[in-house]
Amino acid sequence: MKFLVVLLCCLPGWVHAEIYEWQDVNGGTHFSDRSVAKAKILDIKPGYDFYRVKTVYDGDTLVLEDGRKIRFLGINTPEIQHRGKLADAGGDEAKRWLLEQLKDTKVRLEISAEKTDKYGRTLAHLFTEKKQHLNLQLVEAGLAATSIFPPNFLYVDQLVKAEAKAEQAGLGIWGRPEYAPIAVSSLTEAGHPGWTRLVGKVINIRNTRKSVYLEFSDAFDVRIESQWLDLFPDVNGYLGKTIEVRGWLNKNKGHLSMLIRHPSAIKQRL
């Protein structure tokens, strides 16, 4: 019996629905929109308090006056110059845009399934006193790409639709040559720094207990964790197809891999 049940990202009005959390016999945590034995209701409530922003680090990270470091949920903006590394194309533009929106206003937070990330940053959607949804508007302007980390599905449909519209219009990063898709066949052993888009044909699909691998060549594959497969269409349908994948490359013993957490990071090419 398959015990994994994930949050459905397309439920109408799910933001205000009851979401249940439980653990299986192996200690794994699961989420669902339906109650199961020994499940508890997950406390996901919109924030109603407004806070002043102390520091803006970049387009998707800031610090509140109470000291909390906030990472915007569901999106990723290009990096600014830091730790001796040059800024990514569009990074400074995203930061400037965010600074402008935060002038003379406070923000409130909406938290999804996970309250913090592995760095201790609070994960949130941010809204200004002017009712601006900053995460969504960054994507609408082409200043950010979606970056969905299950089980954080709050506003995922709106973000994915906004990204498709911005990409079609060539706004922001979608009009920059630095973010044009790269052929898998042109990858070198060095890989490619930062967030990138790769295009190639899936020549093999390999399954393990924890993951499914879409293999593009002997040197590159895409990994999808088995616990999130229910979010994707039948992955066997990718075999022999030319697709685009979006994310960050990981290198291990000369082999390149990309972890894909959500189907929005895979685009099928004709």
Image: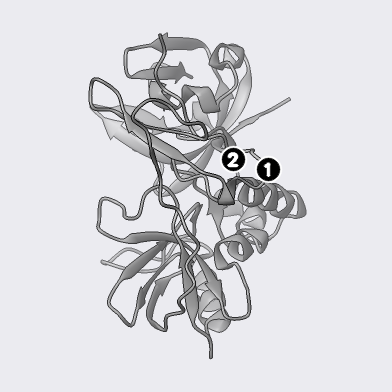
Is residue 191 in sight in this rendering? no
Q: Residue at x 25, y 29 (%)?
A: 252
C-alpha separation, residue under disc 2 versus residue under disc 1: 33 Å
The location of residue 18, given as percent across then percent down, is 51, 43
Task: Report whether 83 appears left or right of 186.
Answer: left
| First in residue order: circle 2 vs circle 1 | 1
The location of residue 269, given as percent across then percent down, is 69, 28
Front label number (2 vs 1): 1
Please state which amino acid type lies under the numbered disc 1: Pro
Quadrant location of the N terminus? top left
* Kind of element beneath mark 1: loop
Using the image, determine if residue 219 lies above or below residue 150.
above
Task: Report whether 58 appears left or right of 100.
Answer: left
* Kind of element beneath mark 2: loop
Mark 2 touches mark 1? (CB < 8 Å): no
The location of residue 242, given as percent across then percent down, is 63, 22
- Outermost residue on the front side: it is 37
Q: Which mark is residue 181?
A: 2
Q: Which residue is mark 1?
A: 12
Q: Which mark is residue 136?
A: none
- Outermost residue on the right side: it is 169
Q: Residue at x 60, y 57 (%)?
A: 173
How many marks the image carries: the answer is: 2
Please state which amino acid type lies under the numbered disc 2: Pro
The location of residue 223, given as percent across then percent down, is 40, 25
Using the image, determine if residue 180 lies above or below residue 201.
below
Q: Residue at x 37, y 20 (%)?
A: 211
Q: Quadrant of residue 14?
A: top right
